[in-house]
Image: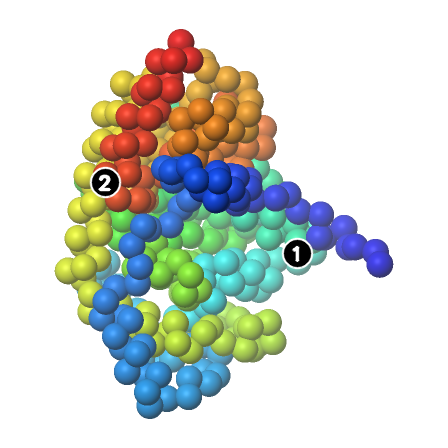
């Protein structure tokens, strides 16, 4: 049976690294995981308790496609608490994780063959989802002097849309209000749709992340309960869109997904009442970040992007290798530390970069850094 040309997407390399790490663990080795972008903690305790109660009294069938009204109201309220915004719950759409948000956004905004700009390095699934939808991802090389973020001059008239992330994966860098406003303005001037990936909001260290909704209503924001709320496997997220786009997205969501998982929505709603636990998780990431910023240069990884948020460090290793995939395999085999090759995030320049995640326990991060230091010393 034939395959479509749209199905010809690249593998997600980090998943291959995870599989290699799993095989090593199955063989009896202890592996330190610095490859995977997910919290080492589970869903908040009160969120799990709320779901347990619901399971006793509710069949948890379909919800309406836009999501539980109580959850949509609570998400809107959060924007008032964190960003000082008076956001209508009618603009909030609950999704099956941010991945469904990307599918919905790209389907609603763009036509076959449209060109959509994404910064490189950037989250690889943007590129692959665009390809699968017969759209054209346009990798825009970002520069270290711009903190690996797009700048207004990168937005050209041939783009139907542009996607940004702040805090970003894989770099952890953020856009300030002025920089974000300038990007949104440049997109509007070029007639391009603007999508802001904000799934790492809440994971910030020295300054607060700015939401694109603070500078404009004429754009899409995508967020998720996966990262700050520590609910990766629950597959629940949300979008905020202009009011006149809600019905369009509702029709698409009804047909593609019916609704986000009801059980996950129940837990997500309760997670808003778990701030103490979530802030404790953030304190662990902050401690890990400090260890990484001290330990990686000592080990020999000296060219790193300043991680303002998320839980990643992106390192230029061009002085150590020209093939990050082979280098990552060498680190896994000899040091027992799983890291992600930069080719996932930048197909052109990623052969000379690595991403290190510090989302696990502080003890794991300390051990991983010690292993990396010994590996690099032995390597010479």
The answer to whether mark 2 and mark 1 are in CB contact below 8 A is no
Residue sitting farthest toward the front? 28
Residue 133: give its label.
1
**Where, quadrant-wise, is the N terminus in this rendering?**
bottom right
In this rendering, is residue 357 above or below 8?
A: above
Kindly identify the residue that appears in the image at 47 percent across and 67 percent down: 96
**Residue 243 % position (x, y):** 43, 72
Residue sitting farthest toward the top? 380
Q: Which of the marked residues, 2 or 1, is nearer the chain's N terminus?
A: 1
Q: Quadrant of residue 30?
A: top left
**Where, quadrant-wise, is the C terminus in this rendering?**
top left
In this rendering, is residue 112 above or below 45?
A: above
Kindly identify the residue that appears in the image at 32 percent across and 32 percent down: 368
In this rendering, is residue 83 above or below 45?
A: above
**Residue 266 % position (x, y):** 34, 76
**Residue 14 % position (x, y):** 50, 41
Kindly identify the residue that appears in the image at 35 percent across and 33 percent down: 313
Mark 2: secondary structure? helix
Task: Calculate the distance from the C-alpha at mark 2 to the C-alpha at mark 1.
Answer: 40 Å
Q: Nearer the viewer, mark 2 or mark 1?
A: 2
Residue labelled with disc 2: 362
Q: Is residue 8 left or right of residue 51?
A: right
Residue sitting farthest toward the left? 276
Please state the total of marks drawn on the protein image.
2
Kindly identify the residue that appears in the image at 60 percent across and 62 percent down: 107
Q: Is residue 42 left or right of residue 342?
A: left
Could you say which is closer to the camera, residue 335 or residue 150? 335
Q: Residues within 10 Å of mark 2 (few under 14, many from 20)?
A: some
Q: Residues within 10 Å of mark 1 (few under 14, many from 20)?
A: some
Residue 125 appears in the picture as rendered: yes
């Amino acid at each position: 049976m034939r395959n479509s040309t749209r199905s010809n997407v690249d593998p997600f390399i980090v998943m291959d690294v995870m599989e290699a790490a799993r095989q090593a663990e199955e063989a009896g080795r202890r592996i330190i995981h610095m490859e995977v972008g997910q919290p080492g903690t589970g869903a908040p305790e009160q969120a799990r308790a709320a779901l347990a109660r619901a399971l006793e009294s509710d069949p948890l069938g379909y919800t309406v496609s836009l999501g539980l009204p109580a959850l949509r109201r609570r998400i809107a309220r959060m924007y008032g608490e964190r960003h000082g915004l008076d956001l209508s719950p009618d603009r909030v759409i609950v999704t099956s994780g941010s991945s469904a948000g990307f599918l919905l956004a790209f389907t609603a905004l763009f036509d076959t063959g449209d060109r959509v700009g994404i910064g490189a390095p950037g989250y690889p699934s943007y590129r692959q989802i665009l390809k699968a939808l017969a759209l054209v991802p346009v990798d825009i090389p970002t520069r270290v002097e711009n903190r690996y973020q797009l700048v207004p001059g990168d937005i050209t008239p041939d783009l139907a849309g542009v996607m940004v992330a702040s805090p970003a994966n894989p770099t952890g860098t953020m856009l300030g209000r002025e920089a974000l406003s300038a990007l949104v303005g440049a997109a509007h001037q070029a007639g391009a749709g603007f999508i802001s990936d904000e799934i790492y909001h809440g994971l910030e260290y020295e300054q607060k992340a700015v939401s694109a909704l603070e500078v404009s209503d004429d754009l899409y924001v995508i967020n998720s309960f996966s990262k700050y709320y520590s609910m990766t496997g629950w597959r629940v997220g949300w979008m905020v869109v202009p009011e006149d786009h809600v019905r369009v997205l509702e029709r698409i969501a009804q047909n593609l997904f019916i609704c986000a998982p009801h059980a996950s929505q129940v837990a997500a709603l309760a997670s808003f009442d778990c701030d103490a636990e979530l802030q404790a998780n953030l304190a662990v990431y902050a401690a890990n970040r400090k260890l990484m910023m001290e330990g990686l240069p000592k080990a020999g990884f000296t060219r790193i992007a300043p991680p303002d948020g998320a839980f990643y460090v992106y390192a230029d290793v061009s002085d150590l290798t020209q093939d990050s995939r082979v280098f990552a395999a060498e680190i896994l085999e000899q040091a027992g530390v799983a890291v992600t090759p930069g080719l996932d995030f930048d197909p052109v320049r990623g052969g000379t970069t690595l991403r290190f995640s510090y989302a696990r326990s502080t003890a794991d991060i300390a051990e991983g850094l010690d292993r990396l230091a010994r590996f690099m010393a032995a390597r010479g």
